[in-house]
Image: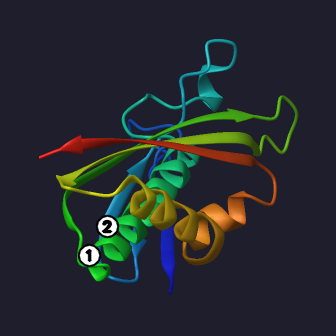
Amino acid sequence: MECTVTWTGAAGTRSKMGFVAETGSGHVIAMDGAPDAAKPENGGQNLAPRPMETLLAGTGGCTAYDVVLILKRGRHDVRGCSVKLTSERADEDPKVFTRIHMHFSVSGRNLPANAVERAIALSHDKYCSASIMLGKTAEITTSFELVEA
């Protein structure tokens, strides 16, 4: 797996702290920093997600993918899955994630709660590389709700 990240804020451009990542699969992700009122030259323009937001989003995508796949493999009639991640970060550099809560909303027909709980646990404990890595610095908790569809 590879990715190339390029600063788009070179001299003569509008962006100050923008970056574009091109993934090995050929997709592009834009990133930008938050505006910095104290030092405008060091801040971004809020034109795209922050790099740490993309890390959190990738973790959500990784674990939601696992949950859907595990439920499908169990022959459950899963029809939707979303996960809302909330996080806290350290106050000092490096400002790693210290707490992450993942709340899953899983919809389907006659989904057993124990199957959804098991799928989330398997993702969290065994399959989701992103959340397992983040679990080295962050306390990760989960919850879920079932929606009959």
The kind of residue tagged 2 is: Val
Residue 61 appears in the rendering: no
Say which residue appears at 23% left-offset and 41% top-offset.
Answer: 147
Q: Position of residue 104 (x, y in %)?
A: 41, 45
Say which residue appears at 76% left-offset and 48% top-offset.
Answer: 138
Q: Nearer the viewer, residue 27 or 90?
A: 90
In the image, is 85 to the left or to the right of 106? right
Q: Nearer the viewer, residue 1 or 66?
A: 66
Q: Nearer the viewer, residue 60 or 102?
A: 102
Q: How many numbered badges does the structure rendering display? A: 2
Mark 2 in CB contact with mark 1 (< 8 angstroms):
yes
The residue tagged 1 is: 72
Crowdedness near tag 2: few (<14), some (14–19) or many (≥20) residues, C-alpha within 10 Å: many
Q: Position of residue 109 (x, y in %)?
A: 15, 55
Q: How is the image coloured?
A: rainbow
The residue tagged 2 is: 68
The kind of residue tagged 1 is: Lys
